[in-house]
Amino acid sequence: MTSESETNEKKQKPIVPYLRLPESAGEKAYLWGSKCRACGAAYVGKRMACAKCFAVGDFEEIRFGEYGTLRTFSIVYQSIPTVEVPFIAAVIDLPEGTAVRANLGGIEPDPDKVVTLLGKKLQMYTVAVRQDKEGNDVIAYRYRPAQA
Amino acid sequence: MKPARDVYVIGVGMVKYGRYPEKTVIDIASEAVITALKDAGITMKDIQMVASGNLSAPVGQQIMRSVGQTGVPVVNVANACATGSTACREAYMSVASGAFDVAMAVGSEQMGKAGLLGAGRIMAGDPAYIPEGVLGSQMMPPVFSEWGVDHMRKYGTTFEDFARVAYKNHKNSVHNPYAQYQQEFSMEEIMNARMVSWPNTLYMCCPTGDGAGVVIYASAEKARRFGSKTVKAAASILTSDPWTASGEAILDINECTRLAAKEAYETAGVGPEDMDVVELHDCFATAEMVHYENLGLAPDGEGPRYLKEGKFDIGGKTAVNASGGLLSRGHPLGATGCCGIAEIVWQLRGESGGRQQPNAKAGLAHVIGLTSACTINVFVK
């Protein structure tokens, strides 16, 4: 009975391996990565070697915080057929020493407005973006202006 | 890297960029080869090594079957948008090293109307997990737009500043019979055109198409024998992107260019202040803006002002993209690097007609390939 209900339950799956979804209520999704013990360089996900200092296999797993700053963006009006436009494509610097690509939410795709966010603090959140072939919700991360 | 011996360009050729569905890429490449051989005053019998740049296919040997099967080594090169210029470097190195006395680089591509570059690669895989448009973008227009907005964040650069790049390059293209588009646009027309990826409108994005270009290199001794209009290839540098903290999220175009520029100027024994003509990688208007500073043509943050003051116009301090650049001349990937070099060679010979930079004595051709690769080829009279 229990196993059957579990089998039929719709699951949530992260769109990339370095997004870890909460396993129980009250937890938050977060991005995780690898920090080089030799030089401190940070990367999303797993690593074999450090591209900065060339150390091999000397990493500790790190949990990236939910905040970052807006390094740059573009408002995309033309894309592949499956993508809704316009959307705000952004690059977010993380204080742990790397950067990620993400869409910006919580703000209109109006250049005059988005420009004011450059260098400003952003907060990560997650959203279901698609369903996969098995009916699972595919979860992506986004960033929005951080609450003051 | 310092070459073991001096290298000269003895011949160049290219075909007018456009869309040629009635021709094969071999036809297009062969036309460019025959033009360059004639320019150098030699035949295929004189060519000791061939490097073929084509991103779609290894067509080098097929080109030989069209223009002359001499049995010499043929190397097929692919390096994203830097494919043609990397082929040029292979040919240059084979002469610089002393291995061969005459080498030819052929860059070719047949793209037709390819639409958004990079879409095919991005669309591959399980569709529900495609990150494009959901986790930002890896398409070329947004990535190069993001580099412009990065400049905006640091220096307050404006949409109008970026549009001015396209204004200049389209204006130059009117004088280049090899350009895919020879049409001048007003600032208003550029800024009001359809927005592709802010801040780049349609006229701030390069077109795709078909094209080919050829550069023939020779040792000093062979160059003397073959002709008087030779130009010295003073440096040919290739770099990849060094580590940066943001490198995982956005492919680098700045650091690989700065590294290549430093090596290129040191090797050539000239500096940015000596550059009379520069063909740089303006795949989007935003890209040209950051490369003024990456190449040392303007101090950091001063690119927009230098552009506005006309320093990069034909007749200015350094004519940048006198050919019309990728924005007007077009960007058939494998051909691009060879044709930027051809333009610099014509400029130094004084053969660029209505787009001629007066008294041009030194110049460089710069290309970025997003993987990332950067090539800088420096030439002096």
Image (cartoon, coloured by chain):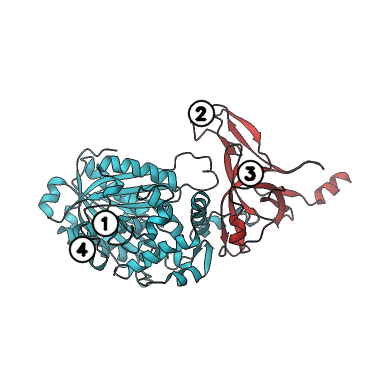
Chain colours: A red, B cyan
Q: Are marks 1 and 2 in contact (CB under 8 Å)?
A: no
Circle 1 residue = B344
**SS type, badge 3:** strand
**SS type, badge 2:** loop
Q: Is residue B368 visible?
A: no
Q: Is residue A106 above or below residue A120?
A: below
The residue closer to the viewer here, B239 or A49, is B239
Q: CA distance from mark 1 to mark 2?
A: 42 Å
In the rendered structure, the residue with mark 3 lies on which chain? A
In the rendered structure, the residue with mark 4 lies on which chain? B
Circle 3 residue = A68
- Disc number for residue B351: 4
Question: In terms of image quadrants, where is residue A88?
Answer: bottom right
**SS type, badge 1:** helix
In the rendered structure, the residue with mark 2 lies on which chain? A
Q: CA distance from mark 2 to mark 4?
A: 52 Å
Amino acid type of disc 3? Gly
The residue closer to the viewer here, B12 or A68, is A68
Q: Is residue B157 left or right of residue B58?
A: right
Q: Residue B151: image x %, image y %?
A: 49, 51
Q: Is residue B368 left or right of residue B62?
A: right
Circle 2 residue = A55
Tags 1 and 2 both on a single chain:
no
The residue closer to the viewer here, A76 or B302, is B302
Q: CA distance from mark 3 to mark 2?
A: 27 Å
